[in-house]
Amino acid sequence: MKSILWRNILREFRFSFARFISIATLLGLGVFVLIGLKVTGPDMRMTGNNYYASHKMADAMINSNTGITKADQSYMRTLPHIKKIEFGTAKDAVIKGSDKSIRVGSKTNQLSINKVVSGRLPKSNNEIALSNHEKSKYKVGQTLRLVNNKGNADISGLKYASYKIVGFVTSSDYLMKENLGATSAGTGQLSTFGIVNKSAFTSSRPTIARISYNNVHGKSYTNQYEKQVQSNVDNVENRLNDRAKQRQSKLKTNAADKLNDAETKLTAQQTKLNQSKRQLATATSRLKSATAQLNQLRNSGQASSTQLSSQQAQLTAQAKQLNANRQQIVANQTKINQAKDRIVNQKKSLADLPDITYQIQSRNDYNSGYNQFGEDAKRIDILSNTFPIIFFAVAILVSLTTMSRMAEEKRQEIGTQRALGYSKFDTMKLFLIYGTLSGLLGSALGAWLGTSFLPKKIFGAYAANFVIPNFQTPPSAFWICLSVIISLICTIVPTVGVAIRMLKDKPATLMLPKPPKSGSKVLLERLPFIWKHLSFNYKVTIRNLARYKGRMLMTILGVLGCTALLITGFGIRDSLNGIVQTQYKDIIHYDVIGVYNSHASKESQQDYRKAADNLSGIKHETDIYYETVSARPKGMTNNQSVSMIVPKSAQGFDKFVTLRNLNTKKKLKLSNNGAIITQKMATLANLKVGDYLTVKTANGEKHQVRIAGITEMYAGHTLYMNQQYYRKAFNQSADYNAKMLMLNDRSAKNIDQVSRKLTRQNASITAVQSDDAKTTINNILAGLNHLVMIIIGAASMLAFMVLFTLTNINVSERIRELSTIKVLGFYPMEVVMYIYRETFILSLLGVLAGFVGGAWLHNYIMQTLPPETAMADLTLLWTNFTTSGVMTLIFSIIVMAIMARKINRVDMLGALKSVD
Amino acid sequence: MAYIDVIHESKIYGSGEQEVRANDDVNFEINKGELTVIVGASGAGKSTLLNILGGMDSPTKGQVIINSKDISNYSSRQMTTFRRLSIGFVFQFYNLIPNLTALENVELASQISPDSLDVKEVMADVGLKQRMNNFPAQLSGGEQQRVAIARAIAKNPDLLLCDEPTGALDYKTGKSILTLLQRFSHRTKKNVIIVTHNGMIKPMADHVIEIGDGKIKQDVLNPNPTPIEQIEW
């Protein structure tokens, strides 16, 4: 039954294979980019969440700079909403014979557990399990020797310096493969970690408390989860700070009490001594008078010589006794004086005692890898809100045109079928089948690649930095259904719509050809001074452009979209690369900040400064106060870490950092009435000059800082102020605790070496390298670069398909015209140019419009794409425009070459014989 | 020597069992300045012959010598050049470019030809002086065919080939078109070849070639062609 109808439908696929494939490809591209970008972020978060869940990652962590006492441990156990709490310790050391620093942590049982990849966890105190990432360098059974910063096998806080490696583990605390965090050991950057027994530490007081909450729901990175944890953390922050202060004041009062006792005792001793001194004086004067009496007696000659000599002997003995007493007293006085000095010193150092901190942080703050992984996923979410729309819009536009054109072409066929007695539904079967198949093929292909290929490619780039394995790519029912529906709408609705409209006509009318679009004058002709000067070919072209207004618009829009995508793709890549360029060439000139302990003894601080001054290869150096504070602008869940820098001498500071306005590039100066904040922080917190920013120090104190200027900076948040303003805002004078160094040799290797020399000093806390941020940004870049390349590839393909499809329609619609001019004796190239001139002009217009669109899209995306700690240079390079434009035009030329072949193969006689 | 000399020309499609001979050993000569009518039924091979004469197709065998040049072995490019410089075509369906005015349609041809005629004069010649700036859709069928003829003439070709030029026109309009062609041929002394299935117009020609089954059936010269006005069909 009706098998011929089916045969006809089948043949349609064969005859219009190019169209079928291009429709499927166009929709496939749209679906590919849509699904790919939409699912990658969620896939990454899910994979991360699985990893965290399998390691029972702690929701929050309390870090202390001293051991947590038993009493405080019990106190922490009673904090609200705590499900589990586990205490642990960690110490940093350097691996012997290398610059690599290692954090040795205590084994955990309940929270943030380590999973054994090979071997086992440590059992005795001299065993260690290393990061799985070290598996290639060490073997189970090998010995790992650790040293302190000075190279000695004596690591404070650890019982042993050499360990037997018993296994390799994974951890949720360390999510990055390199740069695991800041440390006081080695170069200042943590390279790896190891796990030992709790009893391998010398102190029984832990420094870390890991917490899980009983009131958090939802997966990692969800708003629900993050907000709840943050509010739990915020709630107890003040209590913990108070607790730390209490402990500190108790510690201080205890110490002060002891000193006071000693002082009182000393005073009593002094009084006693003074008494003895007085007695001594009386005894001495008595002796003197006795001696005088004796002399008188001797002179008077009244006494016998024996009497005299015995008296003399008595006096001599007395004098000896007194002498001894005197010496005793002097010795005692010295002792007392020494004790006094000691007490004075102790009092002074008590005042200088560093603040005890109990810092509670959520995952985002205590684990930079967690935050960065989430940020990376978020970057893709942001891209997924713009790119797919444009891809899909272009694909829809073009497939709509193509499909309605297909229905128009079938006009006479439909008429004939109707005249032969086929039902209306029969005549539409072709469109339904053709549309369904092309739509399904396209969306299936796009969905498949978008679900697995694209996310895997993107994740692969990130996997270079993260330890999170087993990337999960489950198909997303929602996005796949949506894509299929949109695709089917694109392929079926226009054909069926056109067909229904046509079927309203009588078959007899349908069988007659539709009169060709008649020509008409174009607006330009009314401007003879322009029109007259155009060559004939251009007049023809302009007429034709005006004739097919719809297609003209489609071509321009299609090319616009593709060019904009290309510009944005290239622009994103260059802008992100530019961050590092501008940041380290134009803005930041210093290489290392060596931070030391300002509470350390005067001598060791002096030693540190001397060591810094004596380093070779230093171009400039200056004293600064350096502290990392945090700020949380309104409406944000995450704390932003801000480096605060107070230079000792504001003059000449521009040698180290260029402070300047982002737009005007005008230099900014540190003033007494406010601080200078970096641009991105100002944007995040919506700060203007004159506003106040609340910053929180490590011990939980909050301070208001007035913003006096906003400076250009691309990575990291920094707050600059002079010492006068620091005193005003923080109510204390800046206690210079860091050396800012600018090196002659700025290579990473030299910076590492210098850092290493600094951390070797007793007073050293850490060395902050100015290019730490560079590594982070480069990591993000590597991931995005990959994605951008895929987007560029997809956009190129889209551009090609759009031009191909539209030109193809143009050619087949005007095949008669082409045959006519061919018969007239136009050479092949002239024939091609006759039609291609239009495509080229439209492409050119599209490219120009795409420049505008691309600049806008790039600007829009670059506002949101960089992570919260970074900002991108929004300016596009002119090469972004030229490359994209030239690429689009090259696609257009390739399309022309393909079309030229088709045009040359056109049977000119066949076309001319048929009825119009 | 004759202006056109067709010698043992054959056009064969397919091979073996499926072999179709559209033209089978065709031989004729046409002298300079003749108005030639080639008549035959549908499928007789007359259009194939016209296409070969016009440089749109090559014969399988034999020679086609036009103006002392053998075009039978021309490459595609040579044929294009030949069409461009020497041939004017008029079709049953006028094949005007809908988006160009009548004048522009003619200019389309004249601009690629080195010694083209003045376009406006040609338009006046075909009687379309007043309709030059109209688009094809605004013209009647006869007017459109006149534009097509003007387009063919404007190149100043040596040879004007017309494939059923009146096929889509009514009787009266068809007559005026034929008149135009006859006048052109006699006035300019250029060759015009009209292919038609309408044997009634044979008297207008200087030279009539009848074709059937791909072969020449009759080849007669007519020393006294009848003016079109006097022919009835």
Image (tube, coloured by chain):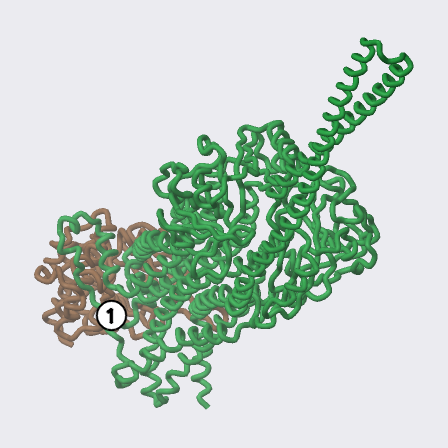
Type of residue at label 1?
Pro
The residue at 23%/47% (across/down) is B114
Question: Which residue ends up furthest to the front in the rendered image?
Answer: A302
Chain coloured green here: A
For label 1, the residue is A516
Q: Colour of chain B?
A: brown
Image quadrant for the C terminus of chain A? bottom left
Q: Nearer the viewer, residue A511 or A540?
A: A540
Tell me if residue A290 comes above or below residue B67 in the rendering.
above
Residue A670 at least partly seen? yes
Give the side of residue A265 with respect to residue A898, left or right: right
In x, y percent, where is residue A736?
54, 37
In x, y percent, where is residue B60?
42, 61
Tell me if residue B180 comes above or below residue A591 in the rendering.
below
Give the side of residue A131 with respect to residue B24, left or right: right
In x, y percent, where is residue A760?
68, 37
Q: How many marks?
A: 1
Residue A449 at least partly seen? no
Residue at mark 1: chain: A
In x, y percent, where is residue B92?
24, 69
Mark 1 packing: few (<14 Cα in 10 Å), some, or many (20+)?
few
Q: Nearer the viewer, residue A276 or B150?
A: A276
Tell me if residue A320 comes above or below residue A822 in the rendering.
above
The residue at 15%/55% (across/down) is A525
Q: Nearer the viewer, residue A283 or A357?
A: A283
